[in-house]
């Protein structure tokens, strides 16, 4: 079974990485799909985010990375993926994720959304929190892979 794991990944955190690792044990292949979506004004370009994810998942032989600007169901169909993988942290995720899963079901009945519960140590972790901490000079070394932390520090050192 092929799973796609779509998201902004702006940037990838240890919470995302945990979902990718656990997903790679469950599915034949996991494709991490970076949402290009330039309207969201991301901190990193889609190419940079792909590069960051690539470096983080390199030991995982069955994980691929791609970017896509369009409906997730369109991408899933293109790749013949049967599963849409998402992570769940808190109750507020659940509302948003359930709405998205139901919507996607109306668009592609054969695509199943599968949720993995966050590992307890990453329940609080989000890309926006990481950016906020770094922006105000805090340490994010325990929240993202080392090379990503370097990129973020460099980004905010410029501003
Ligand atoms: P999006 O903008 O599509 O929500 P994100 O990059 O924020 O993209 O998240 C992608 C997916 O990863 C979502 O399903 C989100 O709930 C999940 N996720 C993000 N952070 C964590 C975490 N710390 N633990 C588990 N899942 C997470």
Image (spheres, rainbow, N blue to C red):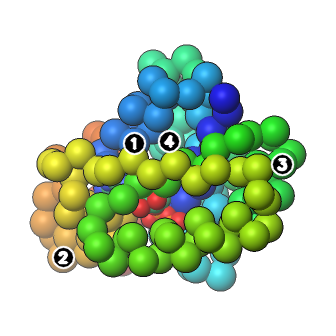
Q: Quadrant of ligand 1?
A: bottom left
* Residue 95 in which image quadrant: bottom left
| C-alpha distance separating marks 2 and 3 | 42 Å
Q: Residue at 52% across / 49% down in the picture?
A: 114
| C-alpha distance separating marks 4 and 2 | 24 Å
Q: Residues within 10 Å of mark 4 (few under 14, many from 20)?
A: many
Q: Residue at 33% across / 77% down in the picture?
A: 92
Q: Name the N-terminal-most of marks 4 and 2.
A: 4
- The residue that label 1 is drawn on is 19
User: Given this view, does label 4 or label 3 mark the residue nearer the observer?
Assistant: 3
Q: Quadrant of the C terminus?
A: bottom left
| C-alpha distance separating marks 3 and 1 | 22 Å
Q: Residues within 10 Å of mark 3 (few under 14, many from 20)?
A: few
User: Given this view, does label 3 or label 1 mark the residue nearer the observer?
Assistant: 3
| C-alpha distance separating marks 1 and 4 | 13 Å
Q: Are marks 4 and 2 in contact (CB under 8 Å)?
A: no
Q: Are marks 3 and 1 in contact (CB under 8 Å)?
A: no
Q: Quadrant of the N terminus?
A: top right
- The residue that label 2 is drawn on is 136
- The residue that label 4 is drawn on is 53
| C-alpha distance separating marks 4 and 3 | 23 Å
Q: Name the N-terminal-most of marks 1 and 2.
A: 1
* Whether the residue under disc 1 has CB within 8 Å of ligand 1: yes
- The residue that label 3 is drawn on is 77
Q: Residues within 10 Å of mark 1 (few under 14, many from 20)?
A: many
User: Given this view, does label 1 or label 2 mark the residue nearer the observer?
Assistant: 1
Closest to the observer, 47 or 91: 91
Residue 2, visible in the rendered structure: yes
């Amino acid at each position: 079974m092929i799973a796609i794991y779509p998201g902004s990944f702006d940037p990838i955190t240890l919470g995302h990485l945990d979902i990718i690792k656990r997903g790679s044990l469950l599915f034949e292949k996991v494709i991490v799909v970076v949402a290009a979506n330039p309207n969201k004004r991301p901190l990193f370009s889609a190419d940079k985010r792909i590069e960051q994810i690539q470096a983080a998942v390199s030991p995982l032989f069955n994980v691929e990375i791609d970017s896509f600007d369009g409906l997730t169901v369109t991408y899933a169909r293109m790749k013949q993926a049967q599963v849409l993988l998402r992570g769940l942290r808190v109750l507020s995720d659940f509302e948003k994720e359930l709405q998205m899963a139901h919507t996607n079901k109306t668009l592609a009945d054969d695509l199943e959304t599968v949720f993995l519960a966050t590992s307890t140590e990453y329940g609080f972790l989000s890309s926006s929190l990481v950016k906020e901490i770094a922006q105000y000079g805090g340490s994010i070394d325990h929240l993202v892979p080392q090379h990503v932390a370097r990129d973020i520090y460099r980004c905010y050192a410029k501003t």
